[in-house]
Image: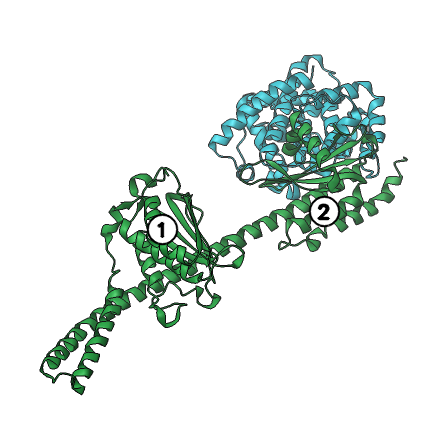
Amino acid sequence: MTALDLSQLIGRVDDLPTLPQTFLRITQIVNNPRASAKDLSAVIGDDQVLTARLLRLVNSSFYGFPQKVSTVTGAIVLLGFDAIRSLLLSSSVFEIFPGRRRKNHKGLAALWDHALGCAVGTKVLGSRLRYDNIEELFVGGLLHDIGKIVEMVYLPEAFSKIQALIKEKELLILDAEQEVLGFSHAEVGTQLATEWKLPQKLVRIIEMHHLPQEAADFSREASLVHFSDILCRALDIGSGGDPWVPPLNDFAWNAVGLDQSGLSSVMSEITRGYRDMRHVINPGR
Amino acid sequence: MPVELGYETVPEFIDKIEDFSHFQEKAGITSGVEHIWGVFLKDMERILNFDLCALFLVNEETHEFELYGVAPEAMRDECLKELDLQIECGVFSWVIDRRLPSVLPSTVFKKRTAVMLPLCTVNRTLGAVLSITQLEESAITMETLKLLGILARQCSLVMENAFLYDHLRKEHESLQKAQSQIIQTEKLASIGRLTRAASHEILNPLNIISGYAHLLKLGAERDSKPSRYLAEIIKESGRIAKVVSGLMQFKGSDAVKTSSADINAVVEKALSLTEYAAKFNKVAVSFAPMPEIPPVVGDSEDLMQVIISIINNSLEAMPEGGDLEIGIEAYRVNEAGQEGKGFVKVKITDTGCGIPEDIRERVLEPFVTTKGDKAMGLGLYMAYCVVQRCGGTIQIGSGPGERGACVTLALPLADKYGDRA
């Protein structure tokens, strides 16, 4: 197969998954500083599935809030507008990709499992560093490999070839992608995130999760995602598309600033958090 | 609200953020919590119409949240109740952990909203602000939440800096105090060395002088002028010898470190020996022995002399009557605040004329006295030497309300007790 042009792929716009309409309206509201909790909850409340998912997430172990939050308004003022947007994105992103290729269902689920594990890990690391917006980190972890999902769903032949190449030559997925497609999942993900008009921070995280030192203003966030990605590979949570643990970036290791004992407690926290979140979010099934 | 309107509100929003960024100019690091809280309340009023706004600060030692101030003060009780209920249901600690502003229904005030703002920096949780507003949950805007967050952050930074500055200032002060104490100790020690050396050098020739004077006097005619002169020489030599041997009396000996004394008994004995003089001066003496106090380092006799000489000073300062109070306390922590060997403080306070400011620094030095020619000024110097030899300290200050004098002896506990005082 000849190398495919990235813009060619993204050019098939009508084919590309889009974010739900509700999410776009939510983004518009969140961008307006004067919008009230009522305005936002009215939009979310229109979508019963979204409302149910949001409340389930808010009441889950993700937050461990000691009381039950029963209204969307309550959730908004308790957690803040940004957090709600990130949570909505987190809970709806799994629905965006239709399971069009039944036979690849298992592979897709494994990718999502990895994404969820990485999201939990990024959140765990972020909380340790007392990072403020952990919901955004969570989404960042969740979406970092979105490019792989696009490849799997929209370029199934190329993706199979990549998989074969990984097995045959024992390549990292990044190198296999270069060989088959001429571009990487990070680039595909970046294009998609831009298309979706996601915040700059998320776009950069997706683009630079393999090279966090080059993510400029967001190198810290990218480092957390990179580190969590590797931890999840080591913990064998889901699948990152190849069986290898990619090399840990020095810059990221320093940015996270963990020591040996911190590392083991982080790893057990991730395992626990992942198990809890799977019941709440249920990726790919 | 149409979404397009949002774009017009953005510049206004930015203006407000800019305003709040001036927080640090309104309250610098040298301002106390009170000032910072005042600035915070003014800014807070611009974000939210509140019925009540309270600041809780984390107590450094107990790690508990303590109410610092409430506006208005009249709602103090309701405010404490609200906090208690929020703590009880676990919400408060959740909000503190999350480190972001949170809005919840109030538990105490029906149909009102509680706004909780954790005050924290990356390193430290300083406290929290609890505010009650009539604004409904659903009417709270993104702007309000963001501004609350920014204000809380600004306030936390200023507060942390102010705390750090205050801490540094205190450290600096205690260091300065310790340094001046070291200088004082050094000074007294060198005076001690000098006097001992000088005394020795004086006594030898003095003995020779007075010896020859005696011999000459034996050969001189009785009641003649030379005989009278020689008698004068012998008498004055004797006086010099007395003063000088007085100085030599306290030369250091380490033997004292192994002896121990019951401080209650020492004080009681000293009081019984000065009882008559106290009665004569119409001074009311009060002393409450501290039960079960372990022995201190030092020789009973020496320590008693120290206490007697301090009591005598006090009595002489109160010729018209007054009060003399002796208190004993046991401590485990030393002056610098470090935990160490325990020690006992004996505090002797009087209501007399006190020690003039200008010589207070020097009263421990030899030949410094407030009693004019009547006294040699060796009492407190001797006391200093004894206490110093026991490894203790002596502090001279004024009594309560800057009246009278207060002498504090700190004596270390004898070795085998020191560690578990």
x and y percentages locating residue B105 in the rendered image: 76, 28
Residue nearest the viewer, comparing B330 with B137: B330
x and y percentages locating residue B21 in the rendered image: 72, 50
Chain A colour as displayed: cyan
x and y percentages locating residue A99 in the rendered image: 73, 16
Q: Is residue A183 above or below residue A15?
A: below
Q: In what element is the residue under mark 2? A: helix
Q: Is residue B12 above or below residue A244?
A: below
Residue nearest the viewer, comparing B192 with B245: B245
Residue ranking furthest to the top: A103
- The N terminus of chain A: image quadrant: top right
Q: In this rendering, does residue B233 appear at all?
A: yes
Q: Identify the residue position indicated by label 2 in the image.
A: B40
- The C terminus of chain A: image quadrant: top right
Q: In what element is the residue under mark 1? A: helix
Q: Are marks 2 and 1 on the same chain?
A: yes
Determine crowd level at label 1: few under 14, some 14-19, many 20+ residues with C-alpha closer than 10 A. Answer: many
Q: In this rendering, does residue A19 appear at all?
A: no
Query: Left or right of A230: which side holds A78?
Result: right
Residue nearest the viewer, comparing A21 with B251: B251
Query: Left or right of B370: which side holds B7?
Result: right
Q: Quadrant of residue B199?
A: bottom left
Q: How many marks?
A: 2
Q: Quadrant of residue A39?
A: top right
Q: Alpha-carbon distance for marks 2 and 1?
A: 58 Å
Q: Say which amino acid is labelled 2.
A: Phe
Residue A11's tag is: none
Residue nearest the viewer, comparing B340 with B39: B340
What chain letter is assigned to the residue under label 1?
B
Q: Say which amino acid is labelled 1.
A: Leu
Chain B colour as displayed: green
